[in-house]
Image (cartoon, helix red, strand yellow):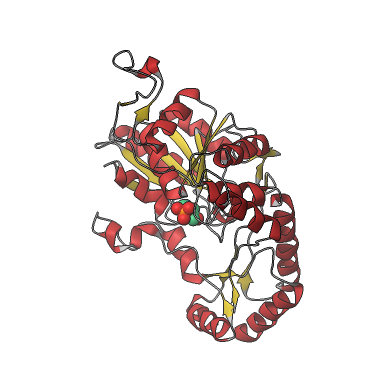
Amino acid sequence: MIPYGRQSISEQDIVAVVDVLHSDYLTQGDKVPAFEQGLMDYTGARHAIAVNSATSALHLACLALGLSEGDRLWTTPNTFVASANCGRYCGAEVDFVDICPITYNLSCEALRAKLLLAAKQKKLPKVVVAVDFAGQPCDWAGLRKLADQYGFSLIEDASHAVGAKYQGEMVGNLSHADITIFSFHPVKIITSAEGGMLLTNKDELANHIRRLRSHGITRNSDEMTKTPDGPWYYQQIELGFNYRMTEMQGALGLSQLQRIDSFIRRRHQLAQRYDAKLTDLPIKLPYQHSSGYSAYHLYPIVLKDVSKRLEVFNTLRAAGIGVNVHYIPVHTQPYYRERGYRLGDYPEAEAYYAGTISLPLYPGLSDEQQDFVVETLKEALK
Ligand SMILES: *Cc1c(COP(=O)(O)O)cnc(C)c1O
């Protein structure tokens, strides 16, 4: 089976994890801070805070930005459910903004129109989560302008986009977002098995996120309500969680980070081979905006004849090609339907979903395997 995405694990990765197992610290040692420092150096972010998943990272980001009951979080329907669920964890209402039919990212025009209306109704969002879908950065300059104008915070869900660039700058350098989030799930760009990271340039946010990651506990006497009883003393000053990353995960992530540029180069090479070999077929290829450099997490094609999608998908799967679909529009999930959303609410996301198939794309995919995918797809489209 050729999967749609897969990790690339080297001997060096294995040694890094085994070394931790032989060491004194399986958690709360120096590997996680080293991984955090590695990502700060790589992206230029002032703070990086590792957690046990991107889902946890999104939850802490929302909490740190003050999202709570009575507030609203807006996101794109073309994402994994976690980008929306983080709002619900905080008791906020979740609403959606339709996508741009070219990049499949949250549409700035749709956002502007929705904000105009929401301002009149006094129902503006507190937080907007925009997703760099497939690894391609959103229109961050446009999003920042609207955030400043309407006073909401911006979370960049860059789960697909570690190593991507926007206007020549690394995703995660926080030139536009308040907090950027990475995922290290094995299908993503680099992996720590499970794992996620929050990046921010704001000291106060970073301090709060670190505290929330570990039970809401502080060991800083300046934050305590009284002088410490002794060197052992700590205080829990709010309700936090245990969202910590283990040392094995930190070591794996740091080891993977050493190879990130070669991973992304190979993804680009493969994407260009698809681009060249899939011309003249009745499909739409992924558009690459000139302002960005994608991390190419996904290669989503869209069939012009959507009635053929299921059959083409099944033919590829039957040939041992693990194609997938990204994403079922979040508002059509039963959980969100129960909260009032319906089919037809976000027509661009729904139209895209109706025709899309994600082709295999990962650094270990060989040219021969990719040629087999191309030939099988061509046959299936005949
Ligand atoms: C994978 C993913 C997540 C969740 O990541 P985990 O690390 O598995 O929690 C969130 N948002 C998007 C867009 C993703 O692709």
| Residue 111 on image: x %, y % | 44, 42
For the N terminus, give its image quadrant: bottom right
Name the residue located 47 percent from the left edge and 39 percent from the top edge: 155
Name the residue located 42 percent from the left edge and 40 percent from the top edge: 128
| Residue 353 on image: x %, y % | 47, 66
Q: Work out which residue is located at the far top of the displayed protein and give it.
A: 227
In this view of the protein, which residue sits in the foreground, 21 or 179?
Answer: 21
| Residue 46 on image: x %, y % | 58, 28
Q: How many marks?
A: 0
In this view of the protein, which residue sits in the foreground, 176 or 88?
Answer: 88
Q: Is residue 289 left or right of residue 69?
A: right
With respect to residue 12, does 316 lie above or below?
Answer: below
* Residue 7 appears in the figure: yes
| Residue 330 on image: x %, y % | 38, 58
For the C terminus, give its image quadrant: bottom right
* Residue 167 appears in the figure: no
